[in-house]
């Protein structure tokens, strides 16, 4: 039984980098049931990614509230921001693992 638990865990566990990319994608598109479950599982065990997810949700909420104002980001700018945030979360999780 222990082996089957490990196999299941390997299939549903995301790295922080995968989770942050998936969380970012979830802001723009609907994730599949499988992806959504994998992301939720990761968020249950990773406080850093929970924090990241909360931050991008807050940024999205603020931008939506300002809709119609002069704040517009190109697709490329959004991608650069998402990559920078993802890298910051990855570095943060690596530093936490070392602690």
Image: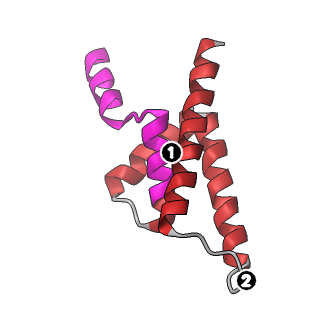
Please identify the quadrant where the N terminus is shown. top left
Residue drawn at the location 54% of the way across and 32% of the way down? 90
Tell me the element at label 1: helix
Span colored in magenta: 1-25
Q: Quadrant of residue 70?
A: bottom right
Q: Taking the image as drawn, is residue 2 in sight?
A: yes
Q: Which disc, if any, is residue 69?
A: 2
Q: In this view, does 50 lie to the left or right of 20?
A: right
Residue drawn at the location 49% of the way across and 35% of the way down? 16
Q: Quadrant of residue 94?
A: top right
Tell me the element at label 2: loop
Which residue, as the protein is rendered here, is positioned at the far bottom?
A: 68
The front one of 73 and 99 is 73
* Disc 2 residue crowd, few under 14, some 14–19, many 20+, Cα 10 Å: few
Please identify the quadrant where the C terminus is shown. top right
* Disc 1 residue crowd, few under 14, some 14–19, many 20+, Cα 10 Å: many
Q: Most prominent secondary structure in the magenta stretch? A: helix
Position of residue 19 relative to residue 32, above or below, is above
Cα distance between the residues tagged 2 and 1:
28 Å
> Mark 1 = which residue?
20
């Amino acid at each position: 039984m222990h082996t089957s638990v490990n196999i299941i865990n390997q299939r549903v566990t995301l790295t922080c980098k995968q989770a942050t990319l998936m969380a970012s994608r979830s802001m723009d598109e609907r994730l599949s049931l499988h992806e959504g479950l994998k992301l939720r599982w990761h968020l249950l065990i990773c406080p850093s990614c929970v924090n990241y997810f909360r931050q991008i949700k807050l940024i999205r909420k603020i931008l939506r509230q300002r809709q119609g104002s002069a704040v517009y980001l190109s697709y490329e700018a959004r991608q650069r921001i998402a990559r920078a945030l993802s890298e910051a979360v990855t570095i943060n999780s690596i530093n936490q693992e070392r602690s």
